[in-house]
Amino acid sequence: MIIPVDNKLNLDPGKVKLAREKAGKIADRLHAWIGDYTTTTTERAAARLMGIDGADESGVPMANVMVDELARSGILDHGLVPWLARSIVAREESPQEIAEALAAGSLKVESIPDCAEEKWREVADKLAGEAAAGIKAVKAERDRLKSKAAPPNKPMLYVIVATGNVYEDAVQAEAAALQGADIVAVIRHTGQSLLDYVPYGPTTEGFGGTYATQENFRIVRQALDRAAQKTGRYTNLVNYASGLCMPEISVMGAFERLDMMLNDAMYGILFRDINMKRTFIDQHFSRMINAYAGIIINTGEDNYLTTADAFDEGHTVIASQFINEQLALRSGLKEEQMGLGHAFEINPAMEDGLLMEIAQAQLCRELFPRSPLKYMPPTKHVTGDIFKTYLINGMFNLVSVLTGQEIQLLGMLTEAIHTPFISDRYLSIKNAAYVFNNAKHLGEEIIFREGGRIQERAVFLLNEACKMLQEIDEISLETAMEKGMFADIKRSRDGGKGGTGVIARHKDYYNPFFTIFMNDTKVEEGRLS
Amino acid sequence: MIIPVDNKLNLDPGKVKLAREKAGKIADRLHAWIGDYTTTTTERAAARLMGIDGADESGVPMANVMVDELARSGILDHGLVPWLARSIVAREESPQEIAEALAAGSLKVESIPDCAEEKWREVADKLAGEAAAGIKAVKAERDRLKSKAAPPNKPMLYVIVATGNVYEDAVQAEAAALQGADIVAVIRHTGQSLLDYVPYGPTTEGFGGTYATQENFRIVRQALDRAAQKTGRYTNLVNYASGLCMPEISVMGAFERLDMMLNDAMYGILFRDINMKRTFIDQHFSRMINAYAGIIINTGEDNYLTTADAFDEGHTVIASQFINEQLALRSGLKEEQMGLGHAFEINPAMEDGLLMEIAQAQLCRELFPRSPLKYMPPTKHVTGDIFKTYLINGMFNLVSVLTGQEIQLLGMLTEAIHTPFISDRYLSIKNAAYVFNNAKHLGEEIIFREGGRIQERAVFLLNEACKMLQEIDEISLETAMEKGMFADIKRSRDGGKGGTGVIARHKDYYNPFFTIFMNDTKVEEGRLS
Amino acid sequence: MNIDYSSVKTYGDTLNDGAMQVSFTLPVPAGDEAREAARQMALKMGLDSPSVTEMADLGAGFTFFVLYGKCKHTVDYSVIKVPKQQQKVMSFKEVNELIKKELGCRIVVVAACTGSDAHTVGIDAIVNMKGYAGEYGLERYPEIDAYNLGSQVPNAELLARAVELNADAVLVSQVVTQKNIHLENLTELIELAEAEGLRDRMLMICGGPRISHELAIELGYDAGFGPGTLPNHVASYIAAELMRRHKI
Amino acid sequence: MNIDYSSVKTYGDTLNDGAMQVSFTLPVPAGDEAREAARQMALKMGLDSPSVTEMADLGAGFTFFVLYGKCKHTVDYSVIKVPKQQQKVMSFKEVNELIKKELGCRIVVVAACTGSDAHTVGIDAIVNMKGYAGEYGLERYPEIDAYNLGSQVPNAELLARAVELNADAVLVSQVVTQKNIHLENLTELIELAEAEGLRDRMLMICGGPRISHELAIELGYDAGFGPGTLPNHVASYIAAELMRRHKI
Ligand code: B12
Ligand code: B12
Ligand SMILES: Cc1ncc(COP(=O)(O)O)c(C=O)c1O
Ligand SMILES: Cc1ncc(COP(=O)(O)O)c(C=O)c1O
């Protein structure tokens, strides 16, 4: 996925290096404490990895039942795996059977006898190894399917479905694939990100979207695979990890062959008021899973420009991308898996606004040359004038092909009106297909005047991002968010939802997946700053 | 109106010079015989200039009555003015009174006695001088109104109205002006170009448009002047001179303060099958009138790309522009008055088609740096998918602002469906206003890669145009049109409509306006090739 | 998804939601009353919950609207029958071979864009050598003699030439449709042919951007061709239909 | 042009031509029958001479259409009356002066985006310091005490805070409108206020992209504000209305 880019913007490599270094230090400062904690959802994710699935009679997922029990009995700080492994040794049952016994009340946490560390470790590592192998198999299947499929569009066409009924979603996803979409995302039910569990089973009455459940993942994945047989192309499936269940949803994604996941703690903090500590810890494990599963993550910097002004705050996106890159590297993600977010959100009424968009998009491209950037369409400033919206979306597509973006969220005709109709997606795909083809090599042909408005803007953005990173390095990322340095939104360090799910690790804490995943996804020499 | 342009395309100035020289020779070859002839409409135009207006009971315009009578009596080869002047001397009546007497049958052509040349010349020159002064006054009024008005958009926004009812046209023209149009054209009734007279009075039941009549010109001019008082901007009015009455309609335009006129003999030959000789003679006088009246002409090269393929035949547009430029100079038009036509008509399904459009538009811009190019929108390849049409029109607007065009015919949402609705114009103006503003200085910021696809295409077009001009120089323009070298259309040298209206001039032929107009509109040193 | 084809509704993102987009202009000044008028118009059309998403002042007392609503009408799709050309489309080569082998004589075709219509691109695409979208035009078919009379040809002249050339098929193009001029003109041509007793002597075929086979049949033609037609579509039809008529 | 406002038709380029554009999807496979179904749908809506200008296969058995036709319905524009806010819009300075001079005490305003709706940009535009489109927000008004509770605030909590702060006006924003959730939520708030006897103690004002003053009145609010609202519009209304109520 490496797109060759020249230095069209006359950027100072020293500045780029500086930004990366500062971002590295900011990430290190977070990672200095992230490893000291676990969270409820991290442990639930481990449970899911160990094969625990399903929900009890009242709909509480087994993973929650188990983790709640361990928390109640005060041993969650050791991690879920040790206890589970010991139970397996003691009862010679499967993880699922143990969970069900716990749920049924027929088994008490305390009733499991201790055993030699060696012994339960062996059981734990074996099960974990099998789980990891399962994920690898899914990854291999994806690689196989992709390698025999026709190559995707460039940039790739990404559309969303959001009906609230997974069966309707599946039909629409299939139609989108037939229309030429490379990527389909199923929007989540409003507010799922604030649920401290993952709903179970298929959704037929969602609101504003469909729950991210493993069954829903499976249903839509099948629909897209079906479409792939007709089109000979591979359609990527996307869902959302961000929220209170980041690692769990990542596990589900790894199992069900999702191809991309939105995965961003900063998004959760700023836009869903999630507790900082909680979500940074969750993000780390969650991204490790994504990394191992070969899933591309999407980060949420684009959202900043819906609450803050896209022209005034363009540099905050750049700064955040640097931070997200460093954080992602520390979770084992390759740059090729980092769909760093940005957006075309400058007020269309702005004189020379298009030049500013080109500058920002080209800057992202040059700063992160190996990353498949996720480029979000105009949303905030589009109106009920659907014709104009269609046109602005076309300009967005033009900037994308001109600057070599990779993941192109398509703008919808009715963005200002309602969640997309089936025809809106079709029209958006036609829009992009026309522009991408008609301007295919424009990027190769066009050079920006030295010292001109475009170069100047890019240089300015990079400078401002550097300054911002320098400041954040001094005050810490948490303080920066307290001060409202991103998205014009202030969040207090200890406030937000989900803080109670954070648990300091015991010195004997054990989770085999950390090792397995991190060993597999070694970051290339010299990439970590 | 001079737009500064760098040599962005790496053009060979020698080639440009060569093209101009060849075009000059082609024009000279036409002008070697044009001056030997007059035509019925040329003489009718002279009648109109001398103040003859109105129509007889059966609707035949006075100018036609008079010219027909002179033709019948075999003295039209002397021109209309000598006889008219002699009648004035003899009868001490106004030109109009004389025309009416002729129409009523109370006066016979032959009954006017001869008189000393000096005497009738004095009368003729005086009347002609007054007519010319009248036109100058109209021009001065235009200059006054423009100087106090806000400056137009850049490129200027040009829309058409085509209701068939001049009163409905007037409302729609006014609305368009209020919406921000800089230029409004009233489309002509289908087939008017083949009428060998100009209809009289207001039109209320036109088909596909409204007749070009002097009354209609006046009604719409007033509507636009009314709008100007509200907007503080000047809205230019356009109509069509091309056809069998080129000079007459130009006279009407000069009287009624039209600001632009479509004026192209080659268009008439190719697209209306008008006799070559006839229309080249007509065009000469007609353009002299436009030149004197300060009217900008629009040429019709854009039409070639509706019958011929825009990619394959792009160079024919360039060649024709060179020829039209040289012809126009020979009629006294300044380059600033030459709205040379070109168009955005490459199939939108073509890979890199946009790059090809940029190359062609930039080439036109650099070859004719002082001329207000008339840029026509996509028409042939747009479909009933109005959303896509709107988008393609936006790309057209983008190319226009990027390459510094001046007269931008706005593409209509419903181009493939019907003549424009009132809302289509509004949407087209919004489209252009957004793109022109949002990409205002894009042209200043963007450079084309040396030897890249865009430069290569432009150089290729210029080379092909040169070759074509060379060939035409050898075989003559008439032969070139016989061979179908323009628009994929073949026209025989002596065929076509209106050939009988061509009359070889008598050695005593006299038309004072030729001298008055040409003396006034001296072409700058060194411009004629 | 279980679609009841006897009662189909428009679809946004959920079966039977009735979603629909509308845009129009009203000759009233922009404002709250105008918006309400637009809403009422939509209600009269059978749109529930109409929502004006854009109102724009066009100046001079006109206002433009974009509106979404939920259409309550249903259509019985299950009973719709549309007349169609039956024969399959053949390639240039296949058509020529068929004519040569089965018909045994060359086909004569006369084409024009008639009336005041001056649009030649469509008919040229079908008839001229060069053809359209990579498909050769009828002039290039060795087994077809094609005559293209050009544009603005009077209907009577077209028929006269067809008789003169003993044409097997007459092709007429109509592009301008303002005030339904194409319908008038096509009807005139058919009536003329009938009056002169020529109607059954040749295939009468029309085409243009607003022509469908169905419309053509209604107007009394043998076939009609719309946007996207390629020369071989027409050639296939003519060859197969002539064979059918000659009972080959 | 002589427009009969008691019977207004849609307008393309000639008075009363009824021109209208429509687009929709049908859950039927693309083809001639689909096109005919679209035409029939248009006829049912009252569109004469419907013409499908675009038909696109959306895959999976759906087809999209763009269609033009001539709408035969008319609307009586002359009798339309729309409830409107009466007072004129004042500037930041004028509002503050008015409050200071005439009301004599600061106005307390409590604002939130309630229910599951998490869109804060709209309410922030009205309330926050920074304001919107160059107009200061209510927080900046020296004579107004504005409290912005943010998003996803339960209706009950908003009311409780309003009582606690002795608010003169409650501002509620609703942006998400899917399945009419905004109507449900706004109705709940009013009913809650009435049940608690608070309704007449404070101005109840709502806003959002699909809110109009008319709709607000219908729902039992004092005023409603839609797209393009600026802070001073709201401030003007509140100040003037409070004066009216206090009979100043
Ligand atoms: C090119 C063009 C012109 C050129 C024509 C050049 C020429 N020699 O043909 C020029 C610039 C000269 C021109 C002039 C005018 N035009 Co014009 N023109 C067009 C345009 C842009 C494209 C038409 C075209 O060539 N399409 C491409 C061809 C390949 O498609 P097609 O015709 O549909 O043909 C295909 C099929 O329909 C079918 N087909 C067609 N005919 C036949 C016949 C048979 C027998 C068969 C089997 C198949 C068949 O096969 C073809 C290939 O698939 C259209 C807008 C548009 N985008 O459609 C306007 C358009 C057709 N023009 C229009 C008008 C009004 C005019 C003028 C009257 C304007 C004026 N007042 O000056 C003039 C006068 C022309 C006249 N008297 O008829 C209107 C018609 C409005 C209406 N619906 O009635 C249109 C729609 C533009 C608009 N929105 O206003 N025009
Ligand atoms: C920005 C945005 C977001 C941001 C919100 C950030 C934030 N903190 O606000 C983010 C990215 C987080 C977001 C998320 C979602 N969004 Co959102 N979002 C938008 C977007 C692009 C712009 C809204 C906006 O800010 N407009 C600008 C402001 C200034 O305009 P405004 O709200 O109309 O406010 C003005 C007036 O209405 C008025 N006003 C508004 N409120 C009030 C109140 C009072 C008292 C007064 C007087 C005036 C007033 O004054 C304001 C200034 O003039 C719209 C699409 C669009 N272009 O409209 C979608 C949109 C609103 N979102 C939508 C959806 C579905 C969602 C999600 C549910 C999607 C999902 N499932 O994940 C989520 C979840 C949010 C939730 N739980 O509510 C849909 C709603 C569909 C519908 N009609 O129901 C929309 C229309 C997009 C779409 N087409 O799908 N979104
Ligand atoms: C990074 C990221 N995660 C998640 C989401 C969606 O989150 P929610 O389901 O909370 O709306 C978004 C929204 O656009 C996002 O950008
Ligand atoms: C140069 C020129 N003259 C005249 C016309 C219009 O001529 P007519 O009225 O014959 O359609 C055009 C059409 O676009 C044109 O380009």
Image (cartoon, coloured by chain):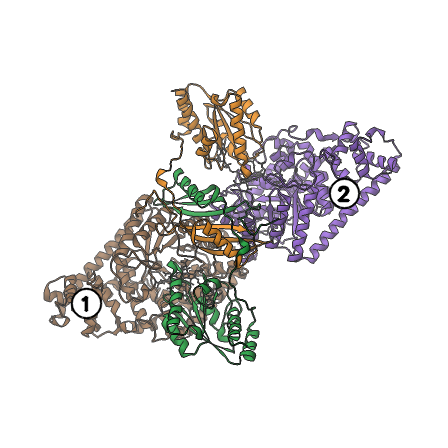
Chain colours: A purple, B brown, C green, D orange
Lateral position of residue B302 relative to residue C142, left or right: left
Image quadrant of residue A228? bottom right
Chain containing mark 2: A
Establish whether labels 1 and 2 are both on one chain. no
Residue drawn 62% across and 34% down?
Answer: A272
Chain containing mark 1: B
Q: Which numbered circle lies on residue A518? A: 2
- Amino acid on which the number 1 mark rests in the picture: Val
In this view, the residue in front, B105 or D133, is B105
Lateral position of residue D147 relative to residue C176, left or right: right
x%, y% of residue D27? 56, 51
- Ligand 2 located in image quadrant: top right
Q: Which residue is mark 1?
A: B81
In this view, the residue in front, A348 or B500, is B500
CB under 8 Å between callouts 1 and 2? Answer: no
Lateral position of residue A64 relative to residue C118, left or right: right
In this view, the residue in front, B228 or B469, is B228
- For label 2, the crowd category at 10 Å Cα-Cα, with few meaning under 14, some 14 to 19 and many 20 or more, is some
- Amino acid on which the number 2 mark rests in the picture: Met
Q: Which numbered circle lies on residue B445? A: none
